[in-house]
Amino acid sequence: MALAASAGLLGPSGAWAQAWNKAAFETKNLADTVKAMGGSAPTESKDIVISSPDIAENGAVVPFTVSSRLPKTESIALLIDKNPNALAASFDIPAGTEAGVTTRVKMGQTSNVTALVKADGKYYYTTKEVKVTIGGCGG
Amino acid sequence: MADPMKIRAAMSGDKVEVKVLMSHEMETGQRKDSKGAAIPAHFIQQVTATHNGKVVLSAQWGPAVSKNPFLSFKFAGGKPGEKVSITWTDNKGEKRTDEATIS
């Protein structure tokens, strides 16, 4: 793969400059996710807000809005502590885009949910508990 | 081929609010079928939104994002009549791009 890329066989990656961070998506907790993203020791912050239901009736579809008031917010990630892998989604926020995203994720069971924000090169987080009545990862 | 995305891009004050609904299984790889065989993971890994050739949001997703993913965000600098384009790529290399006009 590296050879093919260096030989130019894959062509310019353009908007796909950043490859999918497999290591980060395989982590089980916040500390390891931050590490896989190249950071360390996140600080708890009141300037990150997670909006979601406190009780999700259907764990298959739990809506989350995460917004950050931290200056120079560069990225926002959402972690579900008790899912098989913690990291659910990560968003890069370019300048000019509001530091807030809304999406829907699956939750296997009641869990703490952590929003991880990278702002001005540093990592910050906030956590809230979301109770799940029916899990979304069964089969 | 995956179904088209539903994209709405509308002015919200001086910003453009984009709402996207994608059509994708988002199979986690953790489930088993009725015979007990694991259903292979199939999920969107990367999403990029562009406006006038500039990336306004990029995302990396894991299989925990819900089936038929929803995404909403706001960016500055767009005007009615201009286009917003969204592309996703999944873990099997499938890809889809759709666009919407800002209203």
Image (cartoon, coloured by chain):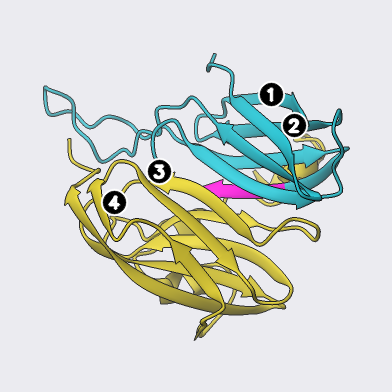
Chain colours: A yellow, B cyan
The answer to which image quadrant residue A71 occupies is: bottom right
Identify the residue under disc 4: A107
Distance CA(mark 3)–CA(mark 4): 11 Å
Is the residue under label 4 in contact with that under label 1 (CB below 8 Å)? no
Could you tell me if residue A4 is visible in this image?
no
Mark 1 and mark 4 on one chain: no
Chain bearing tag 1 is B
Q: Can you say whether A23 is above or below A136 in the image?
A: below
Distance CA(mark 2)–CA(mark 3): 23 Å
Magenta highlight: main SS: strand
Q: Can you say whether B34 is above or below A57 in the image?
A: above
Chain bearing tag 3 is B
Identify the residue under disc 3: B63
Chain bearing tag 4 is A
Say which element carries label 1: strand
Distance CA(mark 2)–CA(mark 1): 6 Å
Is the residue under label 4 in contact with that under label 3 (CB below 8 Å)? no
Give the number of the disc on residue B16.
none
Which stretch appears magenta?
B57-62
- Tell me where residue B80 appears, x and y as whole percent: 85, 33
Q: Amino acid at mark 3?
A: Pro
Mark 2 residue crowding within 10 angstroms, few (<14) / some (14–19) / many (20+)? many
Give the number of the disc on residue B98.
1
Identify the residue under disc 2: B85
Pointer 2 or 3: first along the chain: 3
